[in-house]
Amino acid sequence: MRPMISPASRAVFGAVSSEVTPNGTVEKFPKTETEWAAVRRQALTMVEGANILLTPRPFAVPPNAHKHNEGELAPTEIEARVSKERPAWNKLANFIAEGSSNKVTGLPSAAGCCCSYFIGE
């Protein structure tokens, strides 16, 4: 999930910023419909990633894998831990989904840009 959610979250949460420089404040935000659409797509990727996390499934070992990498849990251990803590797992996945969907529904169009909508204020 990291290759899916991490880049999407960086794009969403990095889309709007303010930086105070010696020359004044620099505001960064999408300015065109195309730029806003790109942010929306990344926010939707986060929502869908969270939906995948909510889907119960077995953590199967790939047919060609004989052991897991150092520092990784074995698939059976992952499945046992997730099953044991399913409510906490679902709470975290829902947190990602809800936070992401708030970003999608709050995104303004370029014509009516208001950055406070983007950050949910």
Image (cartoon, helix red, strand yellow):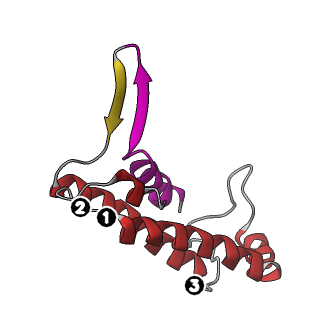
As drawn, is 119 to the left or to the right of 95? left
Say which amino acid is labelled 1: Arg
Q: Which residue matches tag 2?
A: 37
Labels 3 and 1 touching (C-beta < 8 A): no
Please report the bounds of the magenta region as a residue range.
Answer: 2-22
Q: Secondary structure at mark 3?
A: loop
Which of the labelled discs sits on residue 108, or is there none?
none
Residue 65 at x, y percent in the picture:
61, 64
Looking at the image, tell me whether mark 2 or mark 3 is earlier in sequence order: 2
What distance separates the C-alpha of mark 2 from that of mark 3?
27 Å
Residue 50 at x, y percent in the picture:
53, 73
Q: Which residue matches tag 1?
A: 41
As drawn, is 108 to the left or to the right of 110? right
Instruction: Residue at 66% x, 64% y: name it.
Output: 66
Labels 2 and 1 touching (C-beta < 8 A): yes
Quarter of the image for residue 62 reads bottom right
Q: Which residue matches tag 3?
A: 55
Task: Give the camera-side residue of 36 and 92.
Answer: 36
Which label lies toward us, 3 or 1?
Answer: 1
Residue 21 at x, y percent in the picture:
41, 19
